[in-house]
Image (spheres, helix red, strand yellow):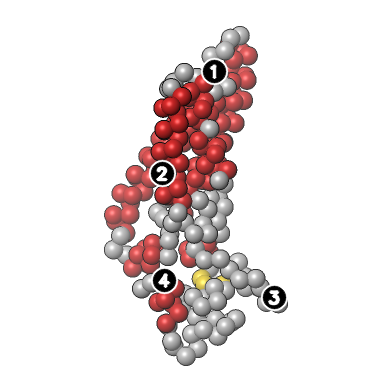
Amino acid sequence: MIGRIFLLSAFPAMWLNGSCSFMASIWWALLVLLFLHIIDSSRGIRTLPSTIMGRFMFGICMFVFFLFFLLGNEAAGRTYWTFADCFIVPFWITVIVTALFWTCLWFGTLIVRNDPEYQQWARTGGHYFWDTLPRVLNPDSELIRNGGFAEPTYSGFVPPENWTHQCPRCLSRVQHAVDVCWRCNYGHDGDSTAYFERHGL
């Protein structure tokens, strides 16, 4: 929600800056809000795209604010950059950079789209763009990026961080993709029903 609000803050800034009318800023904000709702809706427990974009825009905002609004205007002795520009410029940079890298990575998926591992990862909710971003933008663990399911609360034994697979029945971390779960004993009888139900295969 905070990411959405921060992204939408660019539209009142555009109105205050005279870039668009009040009604136009409202309509554009509603359209962007609808778009963010759509791309956020399929993420499950993964970090939402609106949160990721909001973090990126916030970083650009801080850069523009300190370097151009404070230092640049002070050095120039006049106001070249308004406070509204500190939201408008980062918003468009965020949109352009996201669209550019999204498009490039989409073309990259055309190469691996027939790979079974990629297809399985995509079926569990993995996204070629959001789930490949660095931790500073997307803080999800590798386990969440790979499977997209929340782990249970452990008591006693806690599986190591380098165990990057999950039991399809109890969602505990396990060491191998095909393994007998240490917690619920899933897999000991060769029954893979829970796996196919979990991943919809």
Which quadrant of the figure has residue 181?
bottom right
Give me the disc on residue 35. 2
Q: Judge from the rendering whether residue 106 lies leftward or rightward of residue 45; answer left or right.
A: left
Q: Secondary structure at mark 2?
A: helix
The disc at residue 81 is 1
Determine whether, in the image, residue 172 is placed left or right of residue 42.
right
Cα–Cα span, label 1 and label 2? 29 Å
Pointer 1 or 3: first along the chain:
1
Residue where numbered disc 4 is placed = 199
- The Cα atoms of the two marked residues, 4 and 3, are separated by 26 Å
From the image, tell me which residue sits under label 3.
155
Front residue of this view, candidates 147 and 24: 24
Task: Kindly identify the amino acid type of the residue bearing the numbered disc 1.
Answer: Trp
Please give the name of the residue rendered at 45% of the width and 35% of the height, measured from the top-left corner. 29
What amino acid is labelled 2 in the image? Phe
Image quarter where the C terminus lies is: bottom left
User: Which x, y percent locates residue 21?
Assistant: 43, 22
Q: Residue furthest top?
A: 77
Q: With 156 as the anchor, is 106 left or right in this view?
A: left
Disc 2/disc 4 C-alpha distance (Å): 26 Å
Amino acid tagged 4? His
Count the numbered circles shown. 4
Classify mark 1: helix, strand or loop: loop
The amino acid marked with disc number 3 is Ser
Residue 25, quarter of picture: top left
